[in-house]
Amino acid sequence: MSGAVQTGYAPPAGPPPPESGDRWPRWLVALTVAWAVLLAGLTWVSTRNDPPTVREQRSLTQAAPVVDGAIGELVAAATGAVPALLPPEVDRGCRVAPFAEGATLRRQVELAVPGGEERSVLERIADRLPPAWRAGVRVTPDGPRLRADAGEFVAVQGRQVADGRLRLTVDTGCRRVGNGYAAAALGATGAEVGALTEALRALGVPAAEPEALVTAPCPGGGVARTVRSTAGPASASPQAALASLAGGTPVVETPELYAYRRDRVAVLVDLYPDEMLLSATTGCAG
């Protein structure tokens, strides 16, 4: 065979380039635009009407009624204990997105219970909460823990913080702030103010205006209220001074805590070396 190259012959160089005039058919362009419009419409409808699928889709403002109602449910479920509602806490500075600041709403209820009954009280509370909350209590190395879901991605927890002392917490997690959290209107005070004044008088402390009033709506109607006041140390034994108000049978009596019920008002006295913190609460019907 000869190695000469035949003249006038060009070797193949791949497929021919596409014609410069090629473009999508008009029907395909119209179909793509229609599909994009449909997706945008479905997204808008879902945002307006579908339930949230992540916590960040509900703002702090939208979650607040769930939190307040959950506190009322916990108070109603804690029959036999001595409750005290703590002031709401709003912690800002968390992030719901890299460039979006959020906040967390947390509300708590302190419970005084007979020593040794902390786990059984948590279990009774779990049994009395709404079934949809799926509440339960498990034992951990740090003691019994109550966990529940109040809905709208609001978490409920309960734990023992000391002998004869439980703390129930309702927490939103980090949320968009929205319009923030506005506590419910206080309304008129009730028998809790009289019980607080009576306790201060028995302790030999001049009566004064309560320092704080905290409320929560009860599930069956009405409002749970807690009034709080701080006083200096008692000149005599606080336990002895309050014994007559407790009818001689306080719910809890320790060197750090004295709690009793009187005329359907729960009174809880924290005893510190330099001061006393008194709370009087009218709760919810269980």
Image: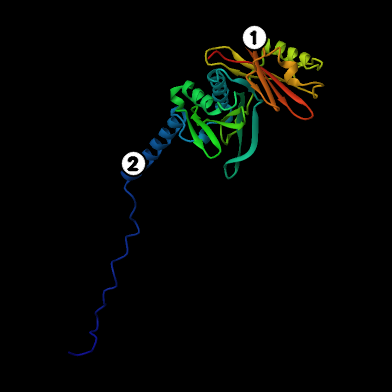
Residue 137, labelled with which disc?
A: none
Q: Secondary structure at mark 1?
A: loop
Res 230 quadrant in image: top right
* Tag 1 residue: 263
Precedes in sequence: disc 1 or disc 2: 2
Between 209 and 144, the one nearer to me in the picture: 144
Image point 38% across, 35% down: which residue? 38
Q: Nearer the viewer, residue 238 or 173?
A: 238
Who's the residue at 49% across and 29% down the image? 148
**Above or below, 272 relative to 281:** below
Residue type at mark 1: give it: Asp
Q: Give the amino acid type for the residue marked by disc 2 in the picture.
A: Leu
Q: Quadrant of residue 142?
A: top right
Q: Tell me where residue 234 sits by quadrant.
A: top right
Q: Position of residue 284 (x, y in %)?
A: 57, 15
* Residue 94, placed above or below residue 265: below
Q: Residue at x 52, y 33 (%)?
A: 145
Q: Between residues 85 and 206, which one lies in front from this camera angle? A: 206
> Where residue 219 sits in the image (x, y, percent)?
53, 16
> Can you see residue 31?
yes
C-alpha distance separating marks 1 and 2? 74 Å
Tell me residue 21's x, y (percent). 34, 56
Instruction: Give the residue number, with chain letter if any, for mark 2.
Output: 31
19 in relation to 63, above or below: below
User: Whole-percent x and y of residue 85?
Assistant: 64, 22
Crowding around mark 1 (Cα neighbors within 10 Å: few <14, some 14 to 19, many 20+) is: few
